Amino acid sequence: MSNLMRWEPFRELISLREAMDRLFEESFVRPWGTWLRPSELGTVAVDMYETDDAVVVKASVPGVKPEDLDISITGDTLTIRGETKREEEVKEENYIRRERFYGTFCRTLTLPVPVVADDAEAEFENGVLTLTLPKAEEVKPKTIKVKAK
C-alpha cells in the first residue's frame, strides 16, 4: 500500500501552465534565442560606470573605423551610431559559416546623471570606444568641512 500516490488534479495543470509559459517566453520574449551576440542583432555591447567626476561608457565596436562612428548626447540620452562595411565582396556563395555582422547599428542609453557634453572625450583603441562624460557641477559630490568652536 505504500506505492499509492494521492491524486492531485491540479498537478497536471501546473505542469501544463509551466510548459505554456516556456513556449510563450521562447517564442515572444526571446525570439532570437540566447545564442546571438549583440553585434548580430545590430546593436552594441556596452559597459557603463560612474566615477566621482564622470560617467564612463565603453562600447565594443570591432571592425568599425573611428570616422564611421557618430556619437551624440541630447539631454540625458547618449546615442552611438555606426556602420560596419564589408571589405571585399565574395562572389562564391559556398559559405560554411557566416557570423560577422555588416550594416548600421545604433545604441541609445539613458545617462544616470546630467553631464557636460561639450567637455566629453572619446578614445578608440583595439575596437573599444571609451567615452568619458564629465558630470555637471550640480551632481558632483561636495565636501563640507566642519569647523570646531
Image (spheres, grey):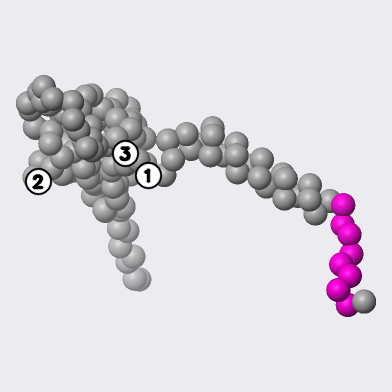
* Residue 123: x %, y % from top left: 10, 41
Q: Nearer the viewer, mark 1 or mark 2?
A: 1
The residue sitting at 89% across, 64% down in the picture is 6
CA gap between label 3 and label 2 equals 18 Å
Label 1 belongs to which residue?
Answer: 35
Q: Which residue is mark 3?
A: 38
Q: Position of residue 65 (x, y in %)?
A: 8, 32
Note whether residue 131 is visible: no
Magenta region, residue range = 2-9
> In the image, 98: left or right of 125?
right
Q: Point out the tag, 1 or 2, that comes first from the N-terminus.
A: 1
Q: State the mark number for residue 126.
A: 2
Q: Is residue 143 left or right of residue 3?
A: left
Q: Name the amino acid, label 3.
A: Pro
Left/right of residue 99 with respect to residue 66 in the rendered view: right
The residue at the far bottom in this view is: 2
Query: Mark 2 falls on what kind of element?
Result: loop
Alpha carbons under labels 3 and 1: distance apart = 10 Å
- Quick one: SS at disc 3? helix
Residue 102 position (above or below residue 15): above
Give residue 33's position: percent from left, percent from top: 44, 40
